[in-house]
Image (cartoon, rainbow, N blue to C red):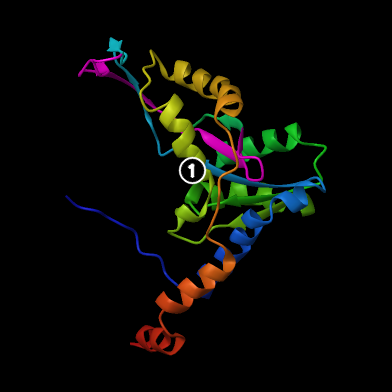
Amino acid sequence: RTRYWRTVRLDERFRGRAEKALWRYANAPRPARRGIRVVCTDETPAPQVLDRDPIRRAIPGPVERREFEYTRHGTANPLLFLVVHTGRMERAVPGAHGAANDARALRQFRRRHRRLKGVFLAHGGGPSHVAAAATDYRTGRGPWRRPRLTPAHASWSNPAELLVNAFGGRYLKRGSWSSRDAFVEHVPTSWPEYNRLYAHPFEWTWANNQVRDWFATHAPPICCTTSQQRH
């Protein structure tokens, strides 16, 4: 058995991004009362659209049984929005991976929430999120949209990952679709039921004071980091 991880670079940029994002998560209810939401976004990790026929669902006694062979219908990358102070899922936007899909999703989100005074939008620093098309749209909205990047190689600092696991485990993981269009249609029609039956605020316990203590323990001294870079 093995485990793997991705090493983060513990520097001032990491701490700055982490503190800004975590402070917003912890204090999300306060700006919400003034019409400003804290929202996180994340994509499902390129799920394949698979067609398995038949699937015999579990009943008392026998486990679920699925056909071993399957037909592939490509992939899709649903982009999910999490409203932090309620735990509710915003409308998912299925589509291709890339900055164009991100920018389209952000435009749709803006149109749906014209009455909000603003949004703190937390997201990762992946290529699709920071590419020119998406970045120009985020920074061109004035004070209404206020981006908060999570640290590099630290996607676990984004609560939207919890939503991806919660929603995907119930509505995507064991599905079978006859086409990619069927999958694309399934995702946005499922989120209202998820909100009605399962949505709740995620308890985020990693506060800023804990981040500072953890950073002080694990981050390399600045002098040593500088020395290593010179060599």
Of residues 71 and 205, which is closer to you in this image?
205
Kindly identify the residue that appears in the image at 44 percent across and 38 percent down.
Answer: 165
Give the magenta-colored segment's residue range: 60-89
In the figure, residue 198 lies in which quadrant?
top right
Kindly identify the residue that appears in the image at 49 percent across and 43 percent down.
Answer: 162
Of residues 113 and 161, which is closer to you in this image?
161
| Residue 122 coordinates in the image, percent (x, y) | 60, 51
Residue 97 in view, yes or no: no
Kindly identify the residue that appears in the image at 59 percent across and 37 percent down.
Answer: 200
The answer to whether 161 is drawn above or below residue 13 in the figure is: above
In the figure, residue 75 lies in which quadrant?
top left
| Residue 160 coordinates in the image, percent (x, y) | 53, 44
The amino acid pointed to by label 1 is Leu
Is the residue marked by circle 1 packed among few (<14), some (14-19), or many (20+) residues within 10 Å? some
Q: Which residue is mark 1?
A: 162
- Was residue 107 drawn as part of the magenta stretch in this picture? no
| Residue 90 coordinates in the image, percent (x, y) | 63, 33
Residue sitting farthest toward the left: 1
